[in-house]
Amino acid sequence: MQNISRNFFSYLSKNKLLNKSAKRWGLQLGASKVVAGLNVENAIETIKDLNDSGRMVTLDHLGEFVNEEQEARDAMEAGLHTLDVLHEHGVHSTLSVKLTKLGLDIDENLCRQHISALAHQASIYGNEINIDMEDYARYEQTLSILHSLREQYDNVGTVLQSYLHRGVDDVHALAGIPLRIVKGAYKESPAVAYQKKDDVDRHFLQMVEAHMLNESYTAIATHDHELIDEVKAFAARNHIPREMFEFQMLYGFRNDLQQSLVNEGYRFRTYVPFGRDWYGYFMRRLAERPQNVTFALRGMFSK
Ligand code: FDA
């Protein structure tokens, strides 16, 4: 049942027609519980509330798999605007971006120009950019772009997914670069990715521990309390300073757990998505956890 649900929502997340139509609908289907509004001005209010509660933020202007040049250019301009607004409001929020939104599938050079412009602007503001990791088809290109950017900018990091067999090797290859470790949200083949939760979880811990032991800044991005407890214990045993890692969760999920980590004195960051392109993001959340469907249905009727 869990697999059927995962496949179904993964399929819906990639449906181009539905993605396009949803931009016109505004936030529907309960998405407003996990997406902080349609524009950056709405999102700023959410960021301020989270900052007031002790949480840092990384802001994601939703959108992905863009295949028109003008759309990719608009996405870059919107990213620059978002960085300006974050700076003007003096909030604690970095920016998370997806390379396919910046034109990766159209022309890699165009995408490189766009992401460089964002890294440059962020560096002027003393802010940071995190490149989200998308599906495996874009993995090598994403890492290659990251490496080139790091030659000029040290305010850029990325995400590694523990469902990929190569995860620990990539952690070592990226020692010194800030990494967010996640389990992975796309449907990948057994040739490259673990399919069983136990394997993904075990590998998640191995990757987190390896990056911490490499004395590299580590973001542990999961809602899984068991893994979080294991990371806390590992960090304590190995005297990893608390300034060298942070926990991260998505906006709208496990708010109590988010706050209790803050109260325990851990660095914490909430990933806050906003924008008209909410559909693919929202469908992936439904694919991840069947219980999220109930959560969404409740959202539909409580608006
Ligand atoms: P998972 O869904 O495996 O759940 C494990 C256990 O945790 C559950 O059995 C339950 O006990 C508990 N749990 C989980 N959610 C709960 C809830 N809402 N309420 C109560 N209990 C709950 N992916 C990607 O491919 N590229 C990326 O760039 C990113 N970026 C990213 C940023 C951040 C900040 C986060 C948190 C996640 C991502 N992801 C991602 C998504 C990630 O890969 C993954 O798909 C989701 O986080 C779901 O996996 P979890 O580790 O959260 O727990």
Image (cartoon, rainbow, N blue to C red):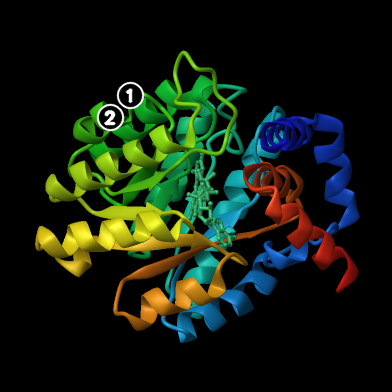
Q: Is residue 301 left or right of residue 250?
A: right
| Residue sitting farthest toward the bottom | 52
| Left or right side of 19 for 195 | left
- Give left or right: position of 45 versus 135: right
Tell me, for residue 122, which label it has, or none: none
Amino acid carrying mark 2 in the image: Asp
Residue that mark 1 sits on: 166
Q: Secondary structure at mark 1?
A: loop
User: Where is residue 222, by image quadrant?
Assistant: bottom left
Q: Residue at x 27, y 46 (%)?
A: 208
Q: Position of residue 246 (x, y in %)?
A: 32, 63
* Most foreground residue, 108 or 195: 195
* Residue at horizontal 33 percent and vertical 24 percent from the top: 166
Name the image quarter holding the C terminus.
bottom right
The one of 55 and 262 positioned closer to us in this rendering: 262
Please, what is the three-letter code of the amino acid marked with disc 1? Answer: Arg
Q: Secondary structure at mark 2?
A: helix
The front one of 50 and 10 is: 10
Q: Is residue 36 left or right of residue 237?
A: right
Q: Which mark is residue 170?
A: 2
User: Residue 104 location, x and y as percent?
Assistant: 55, 28
Residue occupying image coordinates x 55% and y 73%: 255
Q: Residue furthest top?
A: 191
- Residue 250 in which image quadrant: bottom right
Residue 189: image location, x then y, percent: 54, 18
